[in-house]
Amino acid sequence: MMTRMTAFGALALLAACGSASVVENGAAAQASSTTKPLVIAGVSIGMSATAAQAALARDGWNVEAFPGLDWATAVRKEVVRQRNLPVYDFPRQGIESLRATKGDETIVVKFHPVPSGAKVSTVAYSAPTAGRTKEQLRTQLVRALRRAYPQCSPAVEPPDGLVH
């Protein structure tokens, strides 16, 4: 009796898992047909380093490149690490990241080495004052000063340069 119940439970579990995977496959197919790659300032995941740098420069960003490991050096470094040999500083002939600025906006693009060069692995965009007026920034500064110096909280005023 117990064996029949266990077998029945196993069959029910297999049937449920099989039908769930069919639903998941359908959902994945629908999602892949409606998604588009995310592009930030002309840069997207998987782009080559030269294409990403050209796209940022074309849109008026001030681009600064930071050297990193190329594919051959990255492989050599990993071989040394796996053999427990002393790791030393390898020559940086590839590209590790780009830092692009335009006003108070910043984009940091990180790369990973591949045999054909370097490909974009992450893109981080920040704009600390995006969408805030001078009055909102002034209020935020006053709050920060009041938290930092509670003993003079009522009399704290923002610096002269922020009053318009």
Image (tube, rainbow, N blue to C red):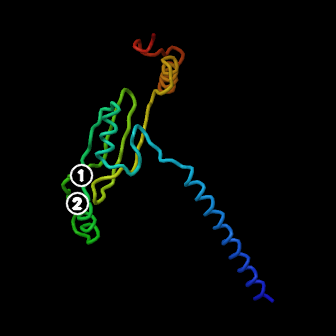
Q: Quadrant of residue 91?
A: bottom left
The residue lying toward the viewer, choosing from 15 and 89, is 15
Q: Which of marks 2 and 1 is nearer the N terminus?
A: 2
Q: Quadrant of residue 5?
A: bottom right
In this picture, residue 6 sits left or right of residue 37? right
Position of 37 relative to 139 (above/below)? below
Q: Residues within 10 Å of mark 2 (few under 14, many from 20)?
A: some
Number of numbered labels in the structure image: 2
Q: Is mark 2 on a helix, strand or loop?
A: helix
- Whether the residues at callouts 2 and 1 have beta carbons within 8 Å, the answer is yes
Name the amino acid type tagged 2. Answer: Thr
Which residue is pictured at 26% across the width and 42% down the height?
A: 65
Q: Tell me where residue 43 appears, x and y as whole percent.
A: 39, 42
Which residue is pictured at 73% across the width and 84% down the height?
A: 7
Which residue is pictured at 41% across the width and 49% down the height?
A: 45
The residue lying toward the viewer, choosing from 103 and 158, is 103
Residue 94's disc number: 1
Quarter of the N terminus within the rendering: bottom right
Name the amino acid type tagged 1. Answer: Gly
- In the image, farthest residue toward the front: 33
Q: Tell me where residue 151 appears, x and y as whole percent.
A: 50, 21
Residue 73's disc number: 2
- In the image, farthest residue toward the top: 164
